């Protein structure tokens, strides 16, 4: 007991000493005396990077085990709690797989940027697991999705047409993320991350408010950020649709009870439907041909429309923005001098050199805006084409592209309940 009291006393005295040092600054000697440089040990970031990768692989492996072997929502829900606590609050939500898109794009276009091995693995590992088993990263490993999953208690279903229309937004987000990263303008995901302020318990009030709004929405709508905003989720949906192993709700045959479809918060379970829709076969074929022909046209239209806004979009680059401010200040000398212009003049900046850099940036923007527009146009055309396809289903099926593997359908399926009762009887 005395030792514990002594340790507490030492801690209090140490805190008082630190407070006193901060309260009373060091004296300013006039004799030329120089204070010695005190070196503080930097945290071992390499160690934590390795821990992050081990946690990432381990947790995704546990999701695979929980979803494919145990068919247990409890496993996935527990991993969601761990993810929010570790990747979210402890690691402050950075570097995450969602934001790593920007680093990868920058490394591809800039020879001066060295992509850290840790960031590359954070980007590639969820994609690799998606190719093998589906969106296991989204299940309970991504802290952004896990946080939404933990607060979700009820689901109001959106119309299918509304969901399809909103699902274009992540691709638009991805296109502009690539655009701004490739032109070295800004990391758009980092600026617009709605949950990083919550994980860091501070930050831009506007983004914190947006994050809280998304969380409140997540209470009643399943994962709105994952479905309608996340650019990395858009990528994973493509790889998951090609996954080697497809998730099944139950190893037994489906009895079409519809409980799994009603329980799914992200509308990823497709109900049975007949291929006979009442229309002539020729009409269905003509519709598919029409949308297939529209696909390249929409791609070119997107490239043209977004590419036409390249100069306006280039204002996101600091050099272009500064150059435009300088031109405005020269055209209107009576206007208040912006801080950026004042700093540029104070540092002896050369406007001709700045203009040369701006011309290079705008040339890059003309190329990458067309690329971004083509991607957006292609996605819109592809989704229209996909809606025109009608495939018959005899039972309820999981859409690998949309399923976030939350595991809710496992506990609702009567077939799984019967399996568990049988196992208990045997044991």
Image (cartoon, rainbow, N blue to C red):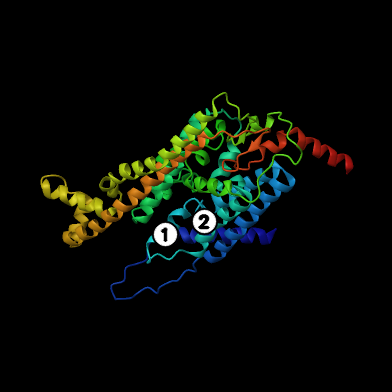
Q: Which mark is residue 91?
A: none
Q: Residue furthest front?
A: 282
User: Which of these two is toward me, 199 or 99?
Assistant: 99
**Residue that badge 1 annotates:** 22
Closest to the camera, between mark 2 and mark 1, is 2
How far across and how far down the image is residue 206, in percent? 40, 40
Q: Is residue 427 above or below residue 15?
A: above
Q: Residue at x 66, y 37 (%)?
A: 408
Q: Which mark is residue 123?
A: 2
How far across and how far down the image is residue 178, in percent? 40, 51
Q: Earlier in the sequence, mark 2 or mark 1?
A: 1
Question: Does any portion of residue 196 appear in the rendered image?
Answer: yes
Q: Residue at x 25, y 52 (%)?
A: 320
Q: How many marks?
A: 2
User: Which of these two is toward me, 385 or 340?
Assistant: 385
Question: Does any portion of residue 216 appear in the rendered image?
Answer: no
> For numbered disc 2, what is the local secondary structure?
helix
Q: Residue furthest right?
A: 426
How far across and how far down the image is residue 120, in percent? 50, 60
Quarter of the figure that contains the C terminus: top right
Callout 2: 10 Å neighbours few (<14), some, many (20+)?
Answer: many
Quarter of the figure that contains the N terminus: bottom right
How far across and how far down the image is residue 211, in percent? 47, 39
Callout 1: 10 Å neighbours few (<14), some, many (20+)?
Answer: few
Left or right, 263 with respect to 296, comes to: right
- Distance, label 2 to label 1, CA atoms, is 42 Å
């Amino acid at each position: 007991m005395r030792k514990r009291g002594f340790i507490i006393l030492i801690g209090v005295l140490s805190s008082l000493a630190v407070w006193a040092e901060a309260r009373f600054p060091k004296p300013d000697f006039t004799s030329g005396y120089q204070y010695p440089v005190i070196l503080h040990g930097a945290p071992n970031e390499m160690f934590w990077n390795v821990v992050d990768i081990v946690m990432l692989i381990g947790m995704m492996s546990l999701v695979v085990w929980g979803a494919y072997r145990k068919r247990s929502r409890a496993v996935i829900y527990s991993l969601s709690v761990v993810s929010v606590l570790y990747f979210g609050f402890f690691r402050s939500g950075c570097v995450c797989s969602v934001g790593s898109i920007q680093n990868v794009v920058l490394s591809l276009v800039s020879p001066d940027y060295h992509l850290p091995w840790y960031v590359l693995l954070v980007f590639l590992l969820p994609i690799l697991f998606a190719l093998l088993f589906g969106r296991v990263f989204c299940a309970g490993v991504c802290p952004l999705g896990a946080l939404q999953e933990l607060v979700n208690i009820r689901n109001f279903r959106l119309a299918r047409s509304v969901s399809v229309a909103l699902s274009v937004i992540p691709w638009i987000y991805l296109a502009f993320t690539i655009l701004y990263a490739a032109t070295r303008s800004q990391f758009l995901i980092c600026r617009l991350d709605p949950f990083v302020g919550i994980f860091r318990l501070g930050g831009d009030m506007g983004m914190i408010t947006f994050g809280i709004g998304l969380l409140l929405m997540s209470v009643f709508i399943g994962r709105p950020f994952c479905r309608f905003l996340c650019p990395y989720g858009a990528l994973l949906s493509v790889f998951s649709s090609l996954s080697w192993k497809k998730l099944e709700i139950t190893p037994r045959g489906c009895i079409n009870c519809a409980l799994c479809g009603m329980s799914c918060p992200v509308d990823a379970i497709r109900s049975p439907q007949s291929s006979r829709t009442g229309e002539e076969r020729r009409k269905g074929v003509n519709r598919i041909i029409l949308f297939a022909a529209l696909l390249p046209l929409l791609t070119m239209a997107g490239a043209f429309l977004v590419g036409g806004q390249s100069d306006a979009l280039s204002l996101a680059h600091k050099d272009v923005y500064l150059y435009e401010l300088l031109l405005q200040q020269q055209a209107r000398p009576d206007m208040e001098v912006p801080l950026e212009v004042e700093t540029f003049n104070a540092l002896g900046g050369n406007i001709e050199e700045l203009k040369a850099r701006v011309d290079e940036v705008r040339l890059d923007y003309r190329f990458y805006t067309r690329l971004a527009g083509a991607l957006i146009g292609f996605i819109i055309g592809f989704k229209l084409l996909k809606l025109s396809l009608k495939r018959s289903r005899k039972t309820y099926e999981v859409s690998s592209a949309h399923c976030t593997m939350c595991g809710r359908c496992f506990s609702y399926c009567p077939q799984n309940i019967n399996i568990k009762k049988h196992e208990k009887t045997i044991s």
